[in-house]
Image (cartoon, rainbow, N blue to C red):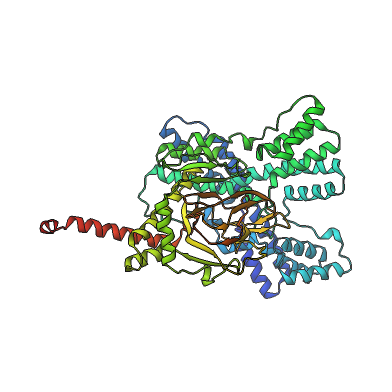
Amino acid sequence: GGGEGRHRCPRLSPYDLLYHNGIEAFSRGDYTNVVRYMEKALRSFSEVHETKIRCRLKCKDQHSLDRFLTDLQLFDVILRRAACLNDCTERKIGPQSMHKVTEEVTQDFNRRVPYNYLQLAYQKLKQLDKAAAAAHTYFQANPEHVEMIQDLEQYKALEGVEERHFINREARPHQKAFSAGAKLYDKGEYGHAAVLFEEALAGYYQADMKCRALCEGPQHFEEQDHTLYRYSLYELISDHYTQILHCQHECIRDLATRPGRLSPMENYLPLHYDYLQFAYFQENKLEEALVCALTYLLFHEGEEFMTENVEYYTEILGSGGQPRQMWLLACKHKPLEHRAPDRTVNSVRACVWVCVCVCVFVCVFTGGPLLYDSVRLVLNSGALNGTQRAVFDDVISEDQCSELQHLTATIAGDGYRGKMSPHTPNEKFEGTTVLKTLQYGYEGRVPLGSARLFYDISEKARQIIESYFMLSSTLHFSYTHLVCRTAIPGQQELRNDLSHPIHADNCLLDPEANECWKEPPAYTYRDYSALLYLNGDFDGGEFIFTEMDAKTVKASVKPRCGRMVGFSSGGENPHGVRAVTRGQRCALAMWFTLDPLYRELERLQADEVIQALQNQLHWAQDHINPKDEL
């Protein structure tokens, strides 16, 4: 409700206050009040959540950003939407300050900590069915909690506790339906499985709409102090909607992530349509099977097995079909048309427009300009049998290759963490960083021009990757390493290992599960990778892309001077290096991030060194004694 006068609904009690009251009651052993406060806190938390969704959807409809003609109209809609959100939220749950809680409390609710207090309180109150449900709910999000595992085993052994009592009170309907459908599918009950997969899809899109709605409203600007921000209104609004867009893209990961996991289920949404097309085929519903197969191909265009299925269904039916018209895919390539090179009102419009209609997955584009006339694209994603990968030639010249290779010979650098052979005992591994090389150049231990070349070439590579993959935000260095791998004589006979094992750069490759878990200790913030080769006069050492099974080779690239491999850093691009069996293989290895918080510290320091050298050069040019010119 929210009517006026005596019909106005009572405002919610802040859930953090209720939560702390519950903790205090627990410390006193007052288990009745633990239950009272914790249950109220959970209801309040849920109601705040749902109220924000309702208000943001309502204000979005009332003040649409779909159309605007002038700058003033754009600003007017944005301000009216903000005022609508404030008014709606305050009428429903009270002043915003009532529900501005600390990050610690938010984390506790996200980790379902109140349910741990509840299960202990219900246990003391002898309400074992409720205790079992609370314990099970907590355990779903905290599967590593050893004590809860023991508690659950004890509950199962107690008289009066049945299997049906172990319910997940926070279960996500779309994930619950999907899991149930997958179990029936495995049992061959395809008709019932299809019903559940359709239910899961409907639930997914509903949850996605709510998740994106929650991204509307105030944003946290962690990178800048906006009280000291001197940028224009255009830039502030652009930053705001960039944050919203990032949040909405995270919904994809969130909706595909099970409680207690840091990584989403691989290929989660498209998998619904894969299951459905086969389930409908088994039920002899070929029209529905065809539609689902075509819809799957919207996500994975040209995938061989599904394309063959479409051809089969079409041949049997004697006609084609159309994929399902999903609102989430309606804007698949539109943002590209609105890209603007600077932070003007056009970039604000582009960013706002993208947030009005955002794809289910991040739209990625390739084929941008290579920026340098000499650089050639020789293999694209299609030729390399994958996505977001490419090979370029003539990125640097033979002379530059020789100079950089000579630099590696001059500096006897370490492998990673000082290990001489971090990847295989059959090769010697040496490397150096940009900052270390510049420091040596400044000290006269290596030619300063060669050190500067290392810095400049890596920046050239970064620009090529950023431009070719058509990234709308700046690509930053995450790590830069000039490395050489040298075959150790006498250790190459009957060798069956790799120079660098198959891996992905921002996730933990799990070939058995066919997953890549984006969680520590992986460098989860890395977004793109590049390897620029300095030579090819060695045996072995081919760069290879594989399937996620880490065995099936999809493409192989032979290094040579000036050749560069670039690719996105996720589980879509597992890769490794075949054994170097003779000679030395040298390359400039670079990893990049779109998140400025994870910029390479050494690179920032190297930037300062380069700037200092530039300043010295300008000072020297400005203070030349005319007599010295003679």
What x and y, as percent, mark residue 238? 45, 44
Does residue 513 sit above or below 233 in this rendering?
below
Q: Residue furthest left?
A: 627
Identify the image quadrant of residue 448. Answer: bottom left
Quarter containing the C terminus: bottom left
Q: How many marks?
A: 0
- Residue occupying the point 75% across, 33% down: 310
Does residue 239 sit above or below 587 in this rendering?
above
Q: Residue furthest right?
A: 159
Does residue 627 sit above or below 269 in this rendering?
below
Q: Is residue 272 visible?
A: yes
Identify the image quadrant of residue 104. Answer: bottom right
- Image position of 479 (left or right of 93): left
- Residue occupying the point 32% across, 67% down: 444
Seen from the viewer's position, the closer of residues 55 and 436 is: 436
- Image position of 400 (left or right of 630): right
What x and y, as percent, mark residue 530? 51, 52
Quarter containing the N terminus: top right
Q: Residue furthest top?
A: 318
What x and y, as percent, mark residue 279? 82, 40
- Image position of 478 (left or right of 316): left
- Residue occupying the point 65% across, 66% down: 493
- Image position of 154 (left or right of 342): right
What x and y, as percent, mark residue 254? 64, 51
- Residue occupying the point 63% across, 38% down: 328
Seen from the viewer's position, the closer of residues 178 and 509 is: 509
Seen from the viewer's position, the closer of residues 604 and 263 is: 604
Q: Is residue 91 visible?
A: no
